[in-house]
Image (tube, grey):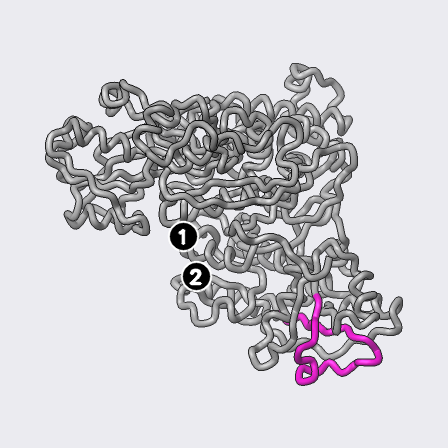
């Protein structure tokens, strides 16, 4: 495995400072809490089935000690989903220093460690790191007038670093060698920006700070500069004991297959003028049975079509980013990940927040309470303390929960999405619950089969149809409001409302318990499983290539569902690309081969995005774009916001091929966008075709204590 390496500027110093080595005996001498004998005997056995009736114990640096460069929420989300897919429970164990991660892991007090170990501990054969999740580089940031270009030139300087930094022990040894070098621990709750201000203000001469990309993030600090790198760009992963081979294999397979699902979008705030110059409108939404869903593999829905019409009116391409929660939607908008929120939010979610603004109201959906016929009075005043059930995260549940405080006595409970509607109605009929929140469009069909039930009053919710923009973008808000007025006057809104809200409209397709993405789901699942891809990513690629048409033929001669050239397919051992099985197998195998071309130190998810770009444009151009990324001070190991930007620069040169390079950027973006929608669907698993991981919904739980818990299952 790749180990953390100090940069060549510091390698000579490390060679001398670490010459004696820091093995387990040295650690035992330096740290009295260390034990090497009896305590390790209670580590769980990992032969055969993993963790029978035992929790999976995750050692994690406390939030105040977490290294700045790590996306703690994302890693917690990944491990939560991994455990859920394996039917395991998690036990989170907080520690406060990287050395504690190492010690507790070796003593058997934990099974997985989230953190970055020091260079000397990285060399210990007793621990092994998983596939990389990201990369990091440690740099020394100082004032712009500092002449220091290597550790040799730090004499007399006052250097600050976090105690949780994996380089702390190196810095302590360096202090003993470099004359008058002073080392100070930064407060554990200090954020990166405050540390930079301390350096700019002269409180410290320099600070050791990590970065996950090389892009210039010091533009807000003109008095600062990067003095030099302390490490190379190194992988970030999780650690397990080296004897936990089954656990390591399971984690690596999960990372390899699903790392792309944990998309960390790039923040790029821009106003409406900049959006028009860029030519792309990024909308933020959630999967919704009426407003954004998938039909035959293609995204559709009332608000989606409305947003697409707005984009077309301004000659903009449309990019869709699907969020997991209302909070995430608002945060993405504020950060500049997207330009407009086009899904409904309860007014309370953004009321009084000056950083966002809402458009005019343009549609209203009524929701009602379905009750027993012998208890039809559902007026708000008479429904206090009554149990109202709706499916988790459904518009109906969100509408009930948006009720004003004066009628909050309605106690809304969430039903698991897998509970059949008939089960809810049966429990309502038996009096186990008081009401079910429904869309009135459903009422005629429901009441035909259940004469013992009746539709009561509408729910006076505040779950309005309004688009949300950043508060500073007045031109965007004006453009949106003008469009919504025009859509009402010219009948577009009425046409779309009839299409998606009328009985037997397209929305009913989205309300089925499970939805196939394509007619070829079983084949896609089989070969994605064989080559360790998320099958929904492959499905998104197939839609982008051929819209699921097995007879598709491109102008360049590419054929079949995966649009491969016959010569390429033949080199992989496939002949008849008109056969869905052969075309999908050939395409997935080719994508796997492309992914394998990228070095192991690149995070697996990034290798997959690189492979998709190479599938479209060729691996040589992707390699050259990565080289250009380094020249542009961008991260060559990250596609979105980095190598894709370098490819734009590459496209401007005649040798780059502007059309094809731009096409590759759009190709990957559109696959990622559609993949985001597919991941939020409940799809039918195909028995015998996939492992237990292949239909993982990947809900992305953000807190270690949070789990999917429903009153009704």
Residue 626's quadrant in the figure? top left
Residue 52's quadrant in the figure? top right
Q: Element under label 2? A: strand
Query: Residue 368's x, y, as percent?
Result: 72, 73
Q: Are marks 2 and 1 in contact (CB under 8 Å)?
A: yes
Residue 318 visible in the current orientation: no
Q: Is residue 168 left or right of residue 390?
A: left
In the figure, 1 relative to 320: above or below?
above
> Which callout, 2 or 1, points at the residue further toward the start of the chain?
1
Q: Element under label 1? A: loop
Residue to which mark 1 is pinned: 269
Q: Which residues are magenta?
A: 363-389
Q: Which mark is residue 31?
A: none
Residue to which mark 2 is pinned: 470
In the figure, 610 relative to 513: above or below?
above
Query: Residue 252's x, y, as percent?
Result: 56, 30
> Going 60% across and 52% down the picture, which residue do you hit?
707
Q: Give how far apart the Cα atoms at labels 2 and 1 are.
A: 9 Å
451 in magenta: no
């Amino acid at each position: 495995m790749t180990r953390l390496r100090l940069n060549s500027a510091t390698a000579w110093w490390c060679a001398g400072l670490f010459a004696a080595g820091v093995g387990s005996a040295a650690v035992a001498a330096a740290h009295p809490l260390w034990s090497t004998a009896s305590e390790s005997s209670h580590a769980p056995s990992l032969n055969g089935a993993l963790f029978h009736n035992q929790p999976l114990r995750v050692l994690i640096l406390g939030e105040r000690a977490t290294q700045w460069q790590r996306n703690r929420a994302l890693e917690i989300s990944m491990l939560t989903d991994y455990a859920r897919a394996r039917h395991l429970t998690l036990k989170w164990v907080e520690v406060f220093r990287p050395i504690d991660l190492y010690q507790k892991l070796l003593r058997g007090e934990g099974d997985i460690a989230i953190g970055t170990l020091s260079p000397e501990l990285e060399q210990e054969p007793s621990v092994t790191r998983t596939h990389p999740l990201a990369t990091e580089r440690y740099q020394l940031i100082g004032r712009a007038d500092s002449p220091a270009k290597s550790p040799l030139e730090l004499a007399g300087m006052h250097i600050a670093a976090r105690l949780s930094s994996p380089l702390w022990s190196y810095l302590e040894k360096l202090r003993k060698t470099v004359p008058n070098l002073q080392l100070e621990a930064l407060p554990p709750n200090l954020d990166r920006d405050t540390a930079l201000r301390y350096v700019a203000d002269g409180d410290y001469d320099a600070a050791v700070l990590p970065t996950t990309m090389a892009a210039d993030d010091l533009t807000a600090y003109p008095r600062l500069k990067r003095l030099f790198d302390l490490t190379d760009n190194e992988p970030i992963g999780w650690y397990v004991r080296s004897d936990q081979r089954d656990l390591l294999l399971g984690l690596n397979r999960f990372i390899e297959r699903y790392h792309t699902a944990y998309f960390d979008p790039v923040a790029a705030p821009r106003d409406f003028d900049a959006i028009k110059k860029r030519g792309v409108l990024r909308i933020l939404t959630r999967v919704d049975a009426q407003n954004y869903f998938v039909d035959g593999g293609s995204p559709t829905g009332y608000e989606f079509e409305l947003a697409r019409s707005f984009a077309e009116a301004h000659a903009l391409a449309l990019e869709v980013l699907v969020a997991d929660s209302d909070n995430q939607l608002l945060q993405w908008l504020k950060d500049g990940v997207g330009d407009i929120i086009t899904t409904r939010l309860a007014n309370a979610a953004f009321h009084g927040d000056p950083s966002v603004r809402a458009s005019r109201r343009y549609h209203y959906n009524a929701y009602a309470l379905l009750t027993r016929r012998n208890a039809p009075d559902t007026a708000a005043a008479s429904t206090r303390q009554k149990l109202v059930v709706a499916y988790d995260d459904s518009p109906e549940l969100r509408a009930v929960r948006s009720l004003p405080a004066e009628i909050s006595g309605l106690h809304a409970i969430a039903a698991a999405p897998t509970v059949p509607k008939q089960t809810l109605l049966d429990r309502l009929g038996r009096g186990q619950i008081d009401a079910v929140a429904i869309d009135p469009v459903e009422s005629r069909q429901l009441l035909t089969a259940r004469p013992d039930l009746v539709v009561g009053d509408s729910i006076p919710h505040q779950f309005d149809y309004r688009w949300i923009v950043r508060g500073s973008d007045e031109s965007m808000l004006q453009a949106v409001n003008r469009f919504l007025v025009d859509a009402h006057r010219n009948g577009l809104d009425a046409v779309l409302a009839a299409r998606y809200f009328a009985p037997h409209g397209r929305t009913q397709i989205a309300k089925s318990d499970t939805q196939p993405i394509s007619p070829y789901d079983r084949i896609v699942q089989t070969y994605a499983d064989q080559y360790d891809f998320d099958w929904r990513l492959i499905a998104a690629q197939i839609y982008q290539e051929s819209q699921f048409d097995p007879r598709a033929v491109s102008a360049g001669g590419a054929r079949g569902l995966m649009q491969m050239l016959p010569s390429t397919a033949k080199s992989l051992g496939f002949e008849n690309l008109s056969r869905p099985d052969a075309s999908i197998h050939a395409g997935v195998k080719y994508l796997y081969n492309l992914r394998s071309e990228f070095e192991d130190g690149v995070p697996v998810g990034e290798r997959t995005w690189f492979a998709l770009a190479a599938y479209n444009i060729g691996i040589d151009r992707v390699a050259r774009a990565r080289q250009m990324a380094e020249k542009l001070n961008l991260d060559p190991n990250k596609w979105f916001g980095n190598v894709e930007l370098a490819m734009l620069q590459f496209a401007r040169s005649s040798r780059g091929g502007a059309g094809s390079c731009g096409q590759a950027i759009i190709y990957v973006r559109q696959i990622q966008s559609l993949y985001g929608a597919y991941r939020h669907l409940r799809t039918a698993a195909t028995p015998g075709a996939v492992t237990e991981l292949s239909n993982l919904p990947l809900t992305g739980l953000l807190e270690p204590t949070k789990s999917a818990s429903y009153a009704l299952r």
